[in-house]
Amino acid sequence: MHPVSTVLFLVGYGLALPPLFRWAQVLARRSSLALAGHQLGMGIAMLGWFLRGRVVIGVAHLAWMVGAKIWFEVAAKAPKRST
């Protein structure tokens, strides 16, 4: 195990998972700060996977980052529901 990749995983997933666990609230509140934190965390974790030589997992993280951004933008254009 590469020690730098481990640090990247801890930092990256530490940033990315909290907004993911509250994804419905992030979308409902249109919280671009939460999305930015999630995207930053996923990017850091992706670098850890690339550093470890797991390109397929790194590409999967990149695909999720693109998909999450598209999902967020589509939800932002939808009429806001009152909660």
Image (cartoon, grey):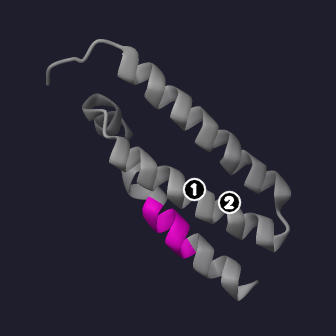
Question: Mark 1 — residue?
Answer: 42
Q: Are marks 2 and 1 in contact (CB under 8 Å)?
A: yes
Residue 48 lies, with reference to residue 63, above or below; the image says: below
In 3D space, how far apart are the residues under numbered discs 2 and 1 (Cα atoms)?
6 Å
Residue 43: image quadrant is bottom right
Residue 26: image quadrant is top left
Q: Identify the image quadrant of the N terminus.
A: bottom right
Residue 15: image quadrant is bottom left
Identify the residue at image location x=59%, y=80%: 7
Picture coordinates of residue 22 (x, y %)?
A: 33, 45
Q: Is residue 49 magenta?
A: no
Picture coordinates of residue 36 (x, y %)?
A: 44, 49
Picture coordinates of residue 3 (x, y %)?
A: 69, 87
Question: Mark 2 — residue?
Answer: 46
Residue 41 lies, with reference to residue 52, above or below; the image says: above
25 sits to left or right of 6: left
Q: How many marks?
A: 2
Residue span colored magenta: 10-15
Residue type beneath disc 1:
Met
Residue type beneath disc 2:
Met
Identify the residue at image location x=21%, y=17%: 81
Mark 2 burial class by Cα count in 10 Å: few <14, some 14-19, many 20+:
many
Instruction: Let me know if residue 28 appears in the view.
Output: yes
Secondary element type, mark 2: helix
13 sits to left or right of 21: right
Q: Identify the image quadrant of the C terminus.
A: top left
Residue 45 lies, with reference to residue 24, above or below; the image says: below
Mark 1 burial class by Cα count in 10 Å: few <14, some 14-19, many 20+:
many
